[in-house]
Image (tube, rainbow, N blue to C red):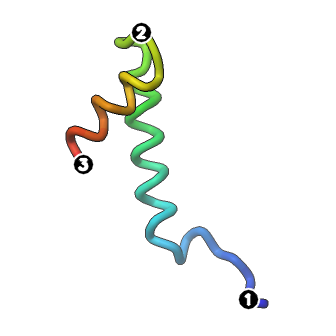
Amino acid sequence: MTIYSPDLNPIEHYWFKIKHEIRKVTPQFKDISMSVEHVMQFI
């Protein structure tokens, strides 16, 4: 089995950015689902 390296997996970078954006906008919305919906509109 090969050693797992998140740095070599591009999807890890995308998930990091998505989670970061969700955390930034969450205080503006009533719940997390609204935050996710808002962020996904811009992807």
Q: CA distance from mark 2 to mark 1?
A: 43 Å
Mark 3 belongs to which amino acid?
A: Ile
Under mark 1, the amino acid is Thr
Q: Position of residue 37 (x, y in %)?
A: 32, 31
The numbered mark at residue 43 is 3
Q: Quadrant of residue 22?
A: top left
Q: Is residue 33 left or right of residue 8?
A: left
| x then y, percent, for residue 6 | 60, 68
**Looking at this rendering, what residue extends furthest in the bottom direction?**
1
Give the secondary structure at mark 2.
loop
Tell me the number on the disc at residue 31: none
Residues under numbered marks 1 and 3 in contact, where contact means CB atoms less than 8 Å apart: no
Residue at the location (46% across, 65% down)?
11
Q: Sort mark 2 into few (<14), some (14-19) or many (20+) by Cα contacts within 10 Å.
A: few
Disc 1 or 3, which lies upstream in sequence?
1
* Total numbered badges shown on the rendered structure: 3
> What residue sits 24% from the left and 48% below the top?
43
Q: Is residue 4 above or below residue 6?
A: below
User: What residue sits 41% from the left and 48% below the top?
Assistant: 17
Characterize the local packing of mark 3: few (<14), some (14-19) or many (20 or more) Cα atoms within 10 angstroms.
few
Q: Percent position (x, y) of residue 9?
A: 52, 73
Q: Are marks 2 and 3 in contact (CB under 8 Å)?
A: no
Instruction: Judge the density around disc 1: few (<14), some (14-19), many (≥20) Cα neighbours within 10 Å.
Output: few
Residue that numbered label 1 is attached to: 2
Write down the residue under mark 2.
30
Q: Earlier in the sequence, mark 2 or mark 3?
A: 2
